[in-house]
Image: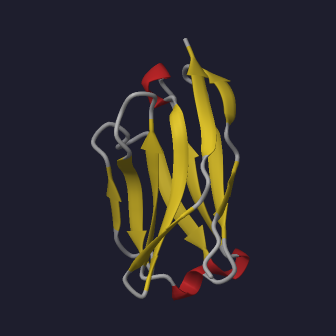
Amino acid sequence: QVQLVESGGGVVQAGGSLRLSCTSASIFSFNSMGWYRQAPGKQRELVAALTSGGSSTNYADSVKGRFTISRNNAKNTMYLQMNSLKPEDTAVYYCNAVFLGVDYWGKGTLVTVSS
């Protein structure tokens, strides 16, 4: 059973920064990992993703240049560094992992950016 646990959400003013973490038992075994978000009344969308080796990353246009995804296999943790946050970044952020073709999700962490 794959379990993903997010942390690091909170309330921040526009222009501020937060770092989200996603911890699992053995992230090195995942085919790919990523962060998604869902704002109230909107569909869940991809924010950033990276391959198992961490050599390839993909970002939503709306966060390019502001967010950075990374992983530390030794700590079994994936991160999302979020800088220059905007009110429109307010959402529940979910950790995602793909293992043997199956998607797994964390319960989410709320990020609120005040103007």
Residue 38 x %, y %: 44, 40
Please state if 47 lies on the left or on the right of 20 as rendered. left
- Res. 52 image quadrant: bottom left
The residue located at (65%, 25%) in the rendering is 12
In the picture, residue 21 is in which quadrant? bottom right
Question: How many marks overall?
Answer: 0
Q: Position of residue 91 (x, y in %)?
A: 51, 34
Q: Is residue 89 left or right of residue 19?
A: left
When the figure is inspected, residue 13 is found, relative to residue 30, above or below; the finding is above
Say above or below: 50 vs 13.
Answer: below
- The percent coordinates of residue 7 (x first, y second) are 70, 51
Quadrant housing the C terminus: top right
Q: Quadrant of the N terminus?
A: bottom right
Name the side, left or right, on which 11 lies relative to 94.
right
43 relative position to 4: left or right: left
Instruction: In the displayed orientation, state which residue is furthest to the top.
Output: 115
Q: How is the image coloured?
A: secondary structure
Q: Is residue 61 above or below residue 49?
A: above
Front-lying residue, 15 or 28: 28
| Residue 101 shows in this picture | yes
**In the image, residue 109 lies at what x, y percent?**
63, 44
Q: State the residue at coordinates (36%, 33%).
A: 42
Q: Residue at x 44, y 51 (%)?
A: 36
